[in-house]
Image: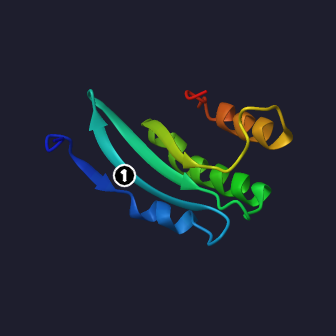
Amino acid sequence: MYKNIKSRPRKAINNFSIKNEFECAAIECELNGSQVIILSVYRPPSGNVNNFLDSMEKLLVSIVNESKKIIIAGDFNIEMLQKNSHRTDLLSLLASFNLMQTIF
């Protein structure tokens, strides 16, 4: 269906994964003339949220200077419908990289 979209795996991103804390994978592709990095991120429910946020920050620091659009998808297992410290910390981290939540 999308054979005309060229993509390549970003295998080095896998090095940021920490079993039972922060799991991630990524591809890079061109969409509408823009280079885009699509990240898939997962935090197991039993994983430490602070470790997850630290790993997410390290990952974002490693790619932010590439001047490519970043899309993050996944399951963070953080309650986003109610205000809480984990939600605030995640949204603050994303905002510090000019990223924002788009699904409410």
Above or below residue 28? Residue 95 is above
Instruction: State the image coordinates of residue 75 (x, y, percent, origin top left).
Output: 58, 50
Q: Position of residue 90 (x, y in %)?
A: 72, 41
Question: Where residue 64 sits in the image (x, y, percent)?
Answer: 53, 42
Side (left or right) of 10 relative to 31: right
Type of amino acid under label 1: Ile
Q: Is residue 66 shown left or right of residue 61?
A: left
Residue 84 occupies which quadrant of the picture?
top right
Q: Secondary structure at mark 1?
A: strand
Q: Could you tell whether 97 is left or right of 54 in the image?
A: left
Residue 61: x and y, percent? 60, 48
Query: In front here: 90 or 12?
Result: 90
Count of numbered circles in the view: 1
Q: Residue furthest bottom?
A: 19
In the picture of the structure, the residue carrying the numbered disc 1 is: 27
As drawn, 92 above or below 40:
above
Q: Observer-nearest residue: 62 or 76? A: 76
Residue drawn 85% across and 40% down? 85
Q: Residue at x 67, y 50 (%)?
A: 77
Q: Residue at x 82, y 32 (%)?
A: 83
> 46 or 102, which is in the foreground?
46
**Residue at (42% x, 54% y) in the render:** 26
Quadrant that contains the C terminus: top right
